[in-house]
Amino acid sequence: MNDFVVNIIGLAKKQHSFEFKLGEAFFNQYGSQTVAKGDFDAIVVLDKRETFIEAKFEIKGKAELICDRSLEPFDQHMDLHRTVRFKYGEEPGEVTDEIVVIKQEQESLDIGQFMYEFIVLNVPIKKIHPKFQNEVDEEDDDEGKMVYQTKVDEEETIDPRWEKLKKLK
């Protein structure tokens, strides 16, 4: 039995709150390629209505990441707030990141998959240990500031064929 599957058939049309602890077992279940270890507290509020269910996710905690520079483990703190709207429709599928179509007769929602995706999408592209953060900030400040300009003699750059066209004006 999956601890992160919520039975939506039996829910009344009102708000329902669910609390979850996300640890190593959670990441083993949903995937451990990007984040293998972490400690998160999640609150999910499902607001069931006639034509849709709105799910508000609040996830706080830390993920243990490996530094790209030193290969040392470090904790990346995260505070996530996301909303997903599950609309009832004929053909199930994901319309956008925030809208998912489900069938009216669907019995449950696997909200664990959504929580996992939110955490993974919040992992920075460059995973840098906090002790190197000042160096990275200085490197980022230098990027894009060099501009090379050369003085171009207009007469040398004009193709003779274009010069003949200019005379036609």
Image (tube, grey):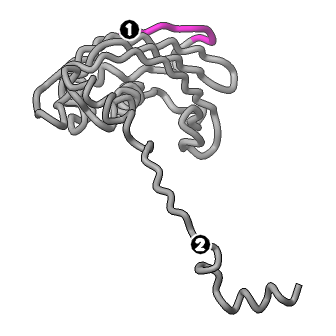
Is residue 93 in the magenta section? Answer: no
Q: Few, some or many C-alpha atoms within 10 Å of disc 1 (few <14, some 14-19, many ≥20)?
A: few
- Comes first in the chain, label 2 or label 1: 1
* Residue 26 in picture, x, y percent from top left: 24, 24
Q: Are marks 2 and 1 in contact (CB under 8 Å)?
A: no
Residue range highlighted in magenta: 12-20
* Secondary structure that dominates the magenta span: strand
Q: Is residue 129 left or right of residue 60?
A: left
Between 85 and 158, the one lying in front of the other is: 158
Task: Work out whether residue 20 can be spotted.
Answer: no
| Relative depth, front residue between 12 and 22 | 22
- Relative image position of residue 118 (x, y in whole percent): 40, 28
Q: Residue 89 sits in which quadrant?
A: top right
Looking at the rendered structure, the kind of residue marked 1 is Glu
Residue lying at 58% horizontally and 11% vertically, measured from the top left: 12
Q: Against 165, is 66 above or below? A: above
Looking at the picture, does residue 90 appear above or below residue 114? Answer: below
Q: Which mark is residue 53?
A: none
Q: Residue at x 54, y 36 (%)?
A: 97
The secondary structure type at the circle numbered 2 is loop
- Write the residue at 23% across / 28% down: 27
The residue carrying mark 1 is 19
Give neighbour class at mark 2: few <14, some 14-19, many 20+ (Cα, 10 Å). few
Residue 153 is tagged as: 2
